[in-house]
Amino acid sequence: MHYDIHGSTDPCAPTILLSSGLGGSGAYWTPQIEALAKTHRVVTYDHTGCGRTGGEVPKDGGIRAMADDVLEIADALKLETFHFIGHALGGLMGLDIALRQPRRIGKMVLINAWSKADPHSGRCFDVRIELLQKSGVPAFVKAQPLFLYPAIFMADNPERMAVEEAHALAHFQGETNILRRIAALRAFDVDAALEKIETPTLIYATRDDLLVPYSRSERLAAGLPNARLHLDDFGGHAVNVVHPDRFNQTILDFLA
């Protein structure tokens, strides 16, 4: 596993481990690193088969195998406890860890995540798979921002969209890996076990997320016994990129 440490070098400093979504890149968290690293040691990493981490997601490993990668990093850093921030797929890993090792995560932030996939999200995954298998990687990559960002954000940042598209093409994680990751997303279901997760949790969601209906976050807030919901009207699926300052301050207030 390739991981990077930002901020404090003190091994006793409070540590935040960040896990991205389907793209799997630690660089996804660039808008958060500087703000979080002022008060914490921040760990970002590339998921299995993504970025600088090699290999492929195990065929039948599911979210648990991906969560084990997080625990592998935490063990390597000798972290008895750590704060965890997960975006979408990354949030599912946090829920899995909180169920299996309830004392490992101090506080948890789930961004546009879910305890069980909504049929609408399944429709979006179907579209993306069709694009990948029938139109190829360039079409899959070109459509990706539509599921991440609000329309006005894409319209106002055409250069950024072009750079992100070129980077995604150059570093595509491979069809096998992404299909297995989507399958893991669809199979994940801890809805009936939410009441067992007592980890203090901030659920961050947006009403205009095209990929994940915010009702999934409302369900998390209702089911988790020690959680609160922060719901923005605007920001899309990648709200931490669209509104980094507001997002970062909300996270720091919660962790404090």
Image: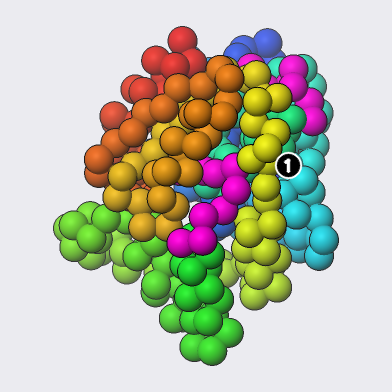
By what rule are the colours in the image chosen? rainbow
Label 1 sits on a secondary structure element that is helix
Residue at the bottom extreme? 134
Residue 93 in magenta? no
Query: Residue 117: within the magenta?
Result: yes
Report how many numbered discs are placed on residues in the image.
1
Residue 30, compared with residue 8, is above or below; it is: below
Residue 24 seen in render: yes
Residue 249 at what x, y percent from top left? 34, 22
Q: Nearest the camera: 14 or 10?
A: 14
Out of 255 and 63, give the one closest to the viewer. 63
The residue sitting at 25% across, 44% down in the picture is 234
In this picture, residue 187 sits left or right of residue 234:
right
* Residue beneath disc 1: 67
Residue at image x 39%, y 15%? Answer: 253
Residue 204: name its quadrant. top left
Residue 201: give x, y in percent of width and height: 54, 23
State the residue in front, 116 or 76. Answer: 116
- With 227 as the anchor, is 173 left or right in this view? right
Q: Residues within 10 Å of mark 1 (few under 14, many from 20)?
A: many
Q: Quadrant of residue 19?
A: top right
Q: Is residue 43 visible?
A: no
Q: Look at the image and give the residue range highlighted in magenta.
A: 100-120
Measuring 81% from the left and 55% from the top, which residue is drawn there? 61
Task: Give the amino acid type for the residue marked by disc 1 in the picture.
Answer: Ala
Work out whether 147 lies above or below 3.
below
Question: Residue 105 placed where, x, y %?
Answer: 67, 22
Q: Is residue 66 left or right of residue 133?
A: right
**Residue name at image x 77 percent, y 34 percent:** 71
Relative image position of residue 112 (x, y in whole percent): 46, 43
